[in-house]
Image (cartoon, rainbow, N blue to C red):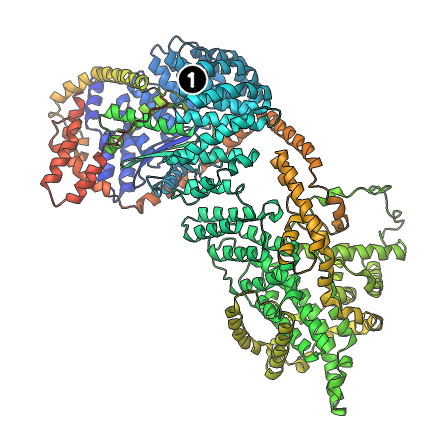
């Protein structure tokens, strides 16, 4: 079983956290911090396994991680998982991200945290490995993206119509909006 | 209505979406908490609107905020609203939020049952898929019960995607609702042969998880798995199956035999390291389970070890790590095969990777021999000096002790060396949690290796002197406990007992239990010093000693720890008593000196016999040898025939006063045992172990004492109907002064308030003669030099010199004049002096015996040596044969040979566990047991091994069968815990906010991303993909922000998956 999947950057900023066992938010942050401290002080040329921290784990649990450029991908797993298998799973996860975001980088994970979660949910479900074949994973993701696009097409139509007359009646919120945000909002609507 | 909707859509356009939120947070990194709290306010506004898209957007933002550590459970109801949306986009966001923040104890979950059921039965497989994924994270027992049937139906869905997810989901259902397992199992089994490999793999996965907790029930599935293993090519599934077999083989040896061949084939054929590794692991498990009766298993072991060697030699650190890990499993059963690769493992000790070094350390246990132990330990100590992480240092420390102490110090040839290693460990470590462990080792070595005691006491004196208790040294102060006990117990070995006494008396901030030991051992040292003064007929010396100790004990008397206080005050009482005797006669002799100039000649009469007796009694208290006793030796004591513990020993008392009816003779017996028991418990306190050592009290010396005490007791008992035996026993434990204590009890007028007053007097009167104390000290030092002249082994003379100079300063404290302060005391002790006389005359005969008392430990030591030999053959025989000081080699060689042969036989037995238990250190236990050591000695004989092994097997079987019942309990306990956590959430949220507000890490990335953001706004027409190009342009154009953009480029850096190692998938 996988207990948790954490992605954070070289400074320990969380980019994705998925716990398959409940911890309250405060404890989650502490776990991330502790894991970061454990992992970040390791050289790149040492092995990718280490004993879990005190907060998460216990003797049966291991941290298995990979370090890509600015990001650490850490899986906390128990002894029923194969260490090398999990390493390969991390590789599959990252490769899938790479395909979905086309040359994935940390910014993609920052701005599309939800999408990353959706991708992850095609690999691991409730702490158990669901699918390891990347083609299958990609097929599932693409099919779901298609549905989302379709739905956006329908619901966005009135929004687009409204956008034509938006200058006539500007609601209160416009005051709150920083000017640079506006073009981005419009851009998003064009999907 | 339509207008409203249009308006809603319109407004939505201007809401912050997730991207805006992320950007905003990055722009406000200085006051992130404040920014997020305003965002949460906005989100609350949005959630109040009717438009589902607005809510959906708000929930998406909340999910992000949750990742940053904010509690969003307050929005639970809104999340459920979003989950129930008919649109897939919203549903997916809703389920994601739910999976992140709901937990099985959420009360809101009961609202979701029908909605989730609807989603599970949806026409769109992705609706159901999303629902299953979300549900797997927060499913509760109620939901499991209500939805089990729906999920089971999905297991036979036409869509493999749903079948796969449903199969995995069932495992979560089983965990929360175990009753579902029985009806669902046939279907699960069916899925093992599903046409879709994904579903198959999922089913294998679930059964593996189930079998891990309760393997016995899944043995019947072995044939199916066997077939899968030989036919499947899916490495992921193969790994799972092979792991499962590893769990099953201990239960069914026949399975193991069948597995060896296909596994060996796989080992030879596969190119995937992960599969190879798991195969080796399972082969090892098989070989462990069928350690005997396998014709060619040595070939398999050889194959495994060879393959592991390849792994360890690989440049990939991961393979190296795993190779060592698997090697340690082989070590347990086939140490010889591993020892062949000693070179490789020792090389790994120097690996740059800490994890690998740790694994190599695990293996060291089996690598040491008498020849290389010292070298290996030296190497480990070197590592410890260099190591940074305290966890790694702790581990090293533990390993050093483990490899040295294994099999009763089988490989330690020089115990003085081992003691210096232990001391070095203490000095090296500034944050260790193994203080207690080292303390136990020190005690164990000192008790079990008599020849090393002289060395030990001097080392310990140095340690007591130089060790500084800092806040950092977590538990290392525990060694003081051992050190103080050793110097006290083996005071006879001390070179300079007075120096040690002063060190112990030095006021220090220590935990109560250690101070307690200090006080106790101060008395021991005092008794020893007083005896040596007696021998020298040095009356002023004793008086000065008394005053000095009394004075210094005040510090302990004022301790907040009740135990320390009690010990210190009883010690004070004892010494005061002695002192009053001395001063009483000192004045007499003073008058005598006026009359005759030959007074100094007659010191023998100058020291009152009563005082001599007290001193003798005190030394007697601590005389006798402590013998290591097996922890379970007590159980080996056979129940004597005709002993019925439920029977009355004496007829029940006819009167209401329970014990006064019995005859006098009976009483005496009773008291003797009580006194013994009290002495025993004291020793127990000192030793710090569960069991207590036996004081061999020479009972023939004390019948007079007994007589007096018995009389006192009779009086008291008749006066006090609520008499508690234990209180009196502890009072009587103070040996010579026991009768006095009893007297106090009787008279019932102990002037407790006057006692401190008296002490003040002592402190106030510290004015007097310096010269005498000097002379006393010199005498002492000379005596000590004479006694400990032959030592000279430790090269720590520097320490001693410095201590001597310190002592010179301390001397001022000695200066209490005996005559002047003696006066107040007799007031209290008059009674005792009145009571004593009969004892004095009677104990005269003891006088001569008493003079040999200080040497008594030595004599006892020589005798006990043989017993300790039987107890710990390896330990003591090694040391003595090496040092050959005792001239007892002839006696020991056979014992050594016997020990060796026993050890060899046992190794062959392959029952490592039973062996370890048998050879467990024999620590001192109940005092009563000592006589039965011989009964205990046959334990290490191999005869017992098979029985113990059977017991082991039984135990493991039992643990399997009980694990089923444990499972639900564990989950419910978990629920309870989570419930508690939820209550604490408010608090934790606040603290988290505070923490992030003060946030420590400088976040370069945020600056750079601001740049990124503004840039993208300018070039809005460009697609996301072109971002990197922009950044590069920017970095070229603006040299001023070069560093910032550099780090921006850093984030743009592709994650570098150029080396896909897809050996599995």
For image coordinates 20% across by 42% down, the residue present is: B1007
Image coordinates of residue B188 in percent, x first then y, are: 49, 14
Residue B791 visible in the shown view: yes
Where B237 sits versus B519, above or below? above
Residue pointed to by mark 1 = B201
Instruction: Give the position of the C terminus of chain B as an image quadrant.
Output: top left
Image coordinates of residue B557 in percent, x first then y, are: 62, 66
Instruction: Give the position of the N terminus of chain B as an image quadrant.
Output: top left
**Quarter-of-image position of residue B124:** top left
Q: Residue furthest left?
A: B1037
For image coordinates 87% across by 41% down, the residue present is: B642
**Quarter-of-image position of residue B1028:** top left
Q: Chain of mark 1?
A: B
Judging depth in this view, the residue of B258 and B612 nearest the camera is B258
For image coordinates 42% across by 12% down, the residue present is: B154
Where B1028 sits versus B870, above or below? above
Image coordinates of residue B556 in percent, x first then y, are: 60, 65
Residue A60 visible in the shown view: no
Q: What kind of element bears circle 1?
A: helix
For image coordinates 48% across by 17% down, the residue present is: B146
Is B896 situated left or right of A115 in this image? right
**Quarter-of-image position of residue B9:** top left
Where B717 sits versus A72, above or below? below
Is B125 situated left or right of B954 in this image? left
Judging depth in this view, the residue of B731 and B200 nearest the camera is B200
Judging depth in this view, the residue of B167 and B755 nearest the camera is B167
Judging depth in this view, the residue of B110 and B844 nearest the camera is B844
């Amino acid at each position: 079983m996988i207990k948790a999947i954490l992605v954070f950057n070289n400074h320990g900023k969380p980019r994705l956290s998925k716990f398959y066992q409940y911890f309250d938010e405060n404890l989650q942050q502490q776990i991330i911090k502790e894991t970061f401290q454990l992992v970040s002080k390791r050289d790149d040329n040492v092995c990718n396994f280490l004993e879990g921290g005190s907060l998460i784990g216990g003797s049966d649990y291991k941290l298995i991680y990979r370090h890509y450029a600015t990001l650490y991908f850490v899986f906390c797993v128990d002894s029923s998982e194969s260490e090398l298998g999990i390493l390969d799973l991390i590789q599959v996860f990252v490769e899938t991200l790479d395909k979905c975001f086309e040359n994935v980088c940390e910014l993609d994970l920052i701005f599309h945290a939800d999408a990353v979660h959706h991708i992850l949910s095609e690999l691991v479900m409730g702490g158990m490995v669901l699918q390891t074949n990347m083609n299958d994973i990609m097929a599932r993701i693409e099919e779901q993206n298609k549905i989302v696009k379709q739905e956006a097409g329908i619901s966005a139509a009135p929004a687009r119509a409204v956008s034509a007359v938006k200058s006539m009646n500007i609601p209160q919120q416009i005051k709150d909006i920083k000017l640079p945000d506006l073009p981005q909002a419009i851009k998003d609507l064009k999907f | 209505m339509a207008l409203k909707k249009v308006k809603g859509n319109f407004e939505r356009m201007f809401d912050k979406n997730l991207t805006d939120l992320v950007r905003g947070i990055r722009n406000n990194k200085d006051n992130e908490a404040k920014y997020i709290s305003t965002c949460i306010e906005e989100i609350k506004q949005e959630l109040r609107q009717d438009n589902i898209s607005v809510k959906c957007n708000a929930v998406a933002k909340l999910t992000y905020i949750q990742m940053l550590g904010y509690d969003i459970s307050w929005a639970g109801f809104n999340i459920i609203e979003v989950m129930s949306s008919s649109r897939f986009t919203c549903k997916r966001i809703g389920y994601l939020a739910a999976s992140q923040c709901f937990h099985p104890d959420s009360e809101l979950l009961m609202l979701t049952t029908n909605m989730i059921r609807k989603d599970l039965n949806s026409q769109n497989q992705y609706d159901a898929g999303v629902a299953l994924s979300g549900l797997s994270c927060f499913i509760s027992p109620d939901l499991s019960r209500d939805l089990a049937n729906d999920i089971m139906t999905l297991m036979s869905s036409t869509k493999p995607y749903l079948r796969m997810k449903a199969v995995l989901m069932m495992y979560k259902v089983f965990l929360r609702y175990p009753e579902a397992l029985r009806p669902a199992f046939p279907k699960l089994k069916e899925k093992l042969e599903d046409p879709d490999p994904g579903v198959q793999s999922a089913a294998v996965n679930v059964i593996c998880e189930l079998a891990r907790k309760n393997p016995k029930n899944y043995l019947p599935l072995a044939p199916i798995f066997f077939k899968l293993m030989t036919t499947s090519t899916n490495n992921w599934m193969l790994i799972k199956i092979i792991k499962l077999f590893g769990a099953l083989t201990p239960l069914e040896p026949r399975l193991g035999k069948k597995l060896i061949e296909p596994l060996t084939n796989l080992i030879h054929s596969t190119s995937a390291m992960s599969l190879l590794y798991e195969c080796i692991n399972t082969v090892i498990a098989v070989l462990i389970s069928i350690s005997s009766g396998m014709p060619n298993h040595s070939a398999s072991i050889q194959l495994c070890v060879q393959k592991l060697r390849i792994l360890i030699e690989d440049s990939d650190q991961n393979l190296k790590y795993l190779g060592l890990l698997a090697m340690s499993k082989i070590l347990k059963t086939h140490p010889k095969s591993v020892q062949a690769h000693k070179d490789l493992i020792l090389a790994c000790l120097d690996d740059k990777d800490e994890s690998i070094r740790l694994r190599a350390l695990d293996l060291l246990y089996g690598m040491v021999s008498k020849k290389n132990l010292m070298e290996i330990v030296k190497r480990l100590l070197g590592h410890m000096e260099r190591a940074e992480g305290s966890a790694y240092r702790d581990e090293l420390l533990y390993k050093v002790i483990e490899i040295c102490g294994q099999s009763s110090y089988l490989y330690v040839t020089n115990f003085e060396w081992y003691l210096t290693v232990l001391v070095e460990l203490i000095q090296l470590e500034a944050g260790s949690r193994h203080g207690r462990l080292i303390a136990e080792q020190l005690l164990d070595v000192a008790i079990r290796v008599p020849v090393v005691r002289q060395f030990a006491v001097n080392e310990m004196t140095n340690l007591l002197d130089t060790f500084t208790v800092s806040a950092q040294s977590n538990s290392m102060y525990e060694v003081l406990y051992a050190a103080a006990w050793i110097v006290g117990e083996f005071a006879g070995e001390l070179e300079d007992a007075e120096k040690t006494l002063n060190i112990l008396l030095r006021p220090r901030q220590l935990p109560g239990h250690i101070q307690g030991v200090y006080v106790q051992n101060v008395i021991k040292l005092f008794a020893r010093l007083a005896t040596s003064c007696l021998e020298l007929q040095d009356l002023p010396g004793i008086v000065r000693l008394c005053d000095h100790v009394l004075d210094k004990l005040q510090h302990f008397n004022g301790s907040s720890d009740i135990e320390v206080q009690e010990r210190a005050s009883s010690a004070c009482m004892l010494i005061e008593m002695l002192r009053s005797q001395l001063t009483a006669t000192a004045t007499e002799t003073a008058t005598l000196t006026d009359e005759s100039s030959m007074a100094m000649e007659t010191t023998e009469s100058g020291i009152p016999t009563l005082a001599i007796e007290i001193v003798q009694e005190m030394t007697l208290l601590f005389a006798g040898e402590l013998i290591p006793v097996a922890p379970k030796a007590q159980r080996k004591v056979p129940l004597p025939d005709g002993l019925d513990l439920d029977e009355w020993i004496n007829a029940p008392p006819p009167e209401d006063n329970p014990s006064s009816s019995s005859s006098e003779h009976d009483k005496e017996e009773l008291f003797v045992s009580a006194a013994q028991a009290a002495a025993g418990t004291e020793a127990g306190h000192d030793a710090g172990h569960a069991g207590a050592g036996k004081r061999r009290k020479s009972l023939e010396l004390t019948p007079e004492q007994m007589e007096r005490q018995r009389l006192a007791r009779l009086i008291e008992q008749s006066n006090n109907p609520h008499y508690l035996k234990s209180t009196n026993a502890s009072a009587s434990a103070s040996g010579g002064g026991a009768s006095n204590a009893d007297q106090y009890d009787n008279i019932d007028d102990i002037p407790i308030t006057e006692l401190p007053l008296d002490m003040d007097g002592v402190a106030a009167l510290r004015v007097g003669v310096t010269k005498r104390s000097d002379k006393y000290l010199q005498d002492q030092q000379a005596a000590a030099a004479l006694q400990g002249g032959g030592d000279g082994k430790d090269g720590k003379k520097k320490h001693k010199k410095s201590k001597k100079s310190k002592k010179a300063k301390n001397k001022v404290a000695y200066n209490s004049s005996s005559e002047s302060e003696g006066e107040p005391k007799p007031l209290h002790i008059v009674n005792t002096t009145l009571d004593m006389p009969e004892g004095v005359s009677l104990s005269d005969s003891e006088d001569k015996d008493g003079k040999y008392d200080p040497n008594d430990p030595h004599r006892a030591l020589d005798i006990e040596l043989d017993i300790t030999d039987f107890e710990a053959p390896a330990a003591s025989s090694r040391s003595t044969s090496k040092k050959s000081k005792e001239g007892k080699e002839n006696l020991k060689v056979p014992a050594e040979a016997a020990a060796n042969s026993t050890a060899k036989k046992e190794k062959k037995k392959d029952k490592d566990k039973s062996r370890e238990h048998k050879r467990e250190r024999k620590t001192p236990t109940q005092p009563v047991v000592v006589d039965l050591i011989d009964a205990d000695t046959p334990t290490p004989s191999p005869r017992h091994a098979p029985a113990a092994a059977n017991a082991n097997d039984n135990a493991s079987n039992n643990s399997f069968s009980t694990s089923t019942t444990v499972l639900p309990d564990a989950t419910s306990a978990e629920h309870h815990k989570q419930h508690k956590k939820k209550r604490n959430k408010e608090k934790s949220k606040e603290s988290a906010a505070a923490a992030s507000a003060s946030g420590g890490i400088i976040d370069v990335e945020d600056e750079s991303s601001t740049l990124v953001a503004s840039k993208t706004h300018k070039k809005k027409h460009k697609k996301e993909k072109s971002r990197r190009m922009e950044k590069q342009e920017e970095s070229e154009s603006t040299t001023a922000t070069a560093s910032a953009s550099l780090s921006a480029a850093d984030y743009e850096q592709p994650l570098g998956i150029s080396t896909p190692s897809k050996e599995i998938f």
